Image (tube, rainbow, N blue to C red):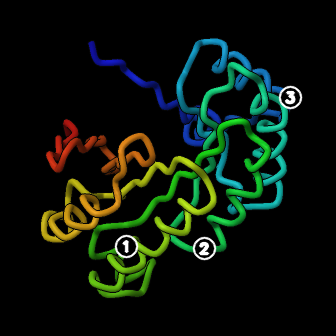
Amino acid sequence: MRKVRIWDTTLRDGLQVPGVAVTLDDKIEMAMNIRDLGVDYMEVGYPAVSSQAYKETAAITAAIGKDPDSPWIAAYAQANREELEIAYESIREARYPMLHLVIGASRQQIENRLHKTPKEVLCLAKDLLEYARSLTPKVQFTIEDAARTDEILTAYEEVMEDWVRPGETARHLIRSLGGAQSTKGQYYRGVE
């Protein structure tokens, strides 16, 4: 029987609701409750976004990340080494530290945010993934807007086959209206 693994993003993505203000104590209490539910992976923050986010990510990690029943503790990072380093530093004390590397795939993201050609982004993805792997035993690699960019997704498929090692790295294809998980080169598109 196949095990369903739960990846919880409440402490990062779930708190991005207009008008919601949560204290650090509240976040730690939520993290403890989420841990007690038995999730496998908990994304606890985006530490590179601000010094406050870094402090909160590190504090949540310190509060629950060393427990014997701790899930994998993940920190979110966009596609650059500095963000990966900041993310790693914020969770390095976790019993099971994990990085969540996100790289854009749409033409607009590649040209306007990353300021690169698609080929340069593929090289960047390989480089950053190897770097992330050198920091933590597991890496979640997300290709943002992948389901809307078939031509670039095809190139990413080739990259993915090279870097996914069993038990080490997860891959995730996301778009703002849904996600798609990949398994053995097969890509399942999210429902719009």
Residue 106 vs 192, above or below: the answer is below
Amino acid type, mark 3: Asp
Residue 42 vs 134, above or below: the answer is above
Between 24 and 137, which is closer to the camera in this rendering? 137
Which element carries disc 2, helix, strand or loop? helix
Q: Position of residue 7 (x, y in %)?
A: 48, 31
Q: Residue at x 50, y 51 (%)?
A: 139
Amino acid type, mark 1: Gln
Q: The N terminus appears in which quarter of the rendering? A: top left
Q: Position of residue 61 (x, y in %)?
A: 77, 38
Between 188 and 13, which is closer to the camera in this rendering? 188
Q: What is the spatial separation of the Cα atoms under label 3 and label 1, in whole angstroms?
A: 35 Å
Label of residue 189 in the image:
none
Q: Position of residue 135 (x, y in %)?
A: 63, 59
Q: What is the spatial separation of the Cα atoms under label 2 and label 1, in whole angstroms?
A: 18 Å
Residue ID for mark 3:
25
Q: Residue at x 40, y 71 (%)?
A: 125
Residue 31 vs 167, above or below: the answer is above
Which element carries disc 1, helix, strand or loop? helix
Q: Are marks 3 and 1 in contact (CB under 8 Å)?
A: no
Work out whether mark 3 precedes mark 1 in sequence or the reverse, and give the earlier one.
3
Amino acid type, mark 2: Arg
Left or right relative to 120: residue 10: right
Q: Are marks 2 and 3 in contact (CB under 8 Å)?
A: no
Closer to us: mark 2 or mark 1?
A: 2
Task: Count residues near mark 2 (Cα–Cα under 10 Å), then give few for <14, some for 14-19, many for 20+.
Answer: some
Residue 74 vs 153, above or below: the answer is above
Residue ID for mark 1:
109
Between 144 and 135, which is closer to the camera in this rendering? 135
Label of residue 81 in the image:
2
Q: Residue furthest front?
A: 166
Which element carries disc 3, helix, strand or loop? helix
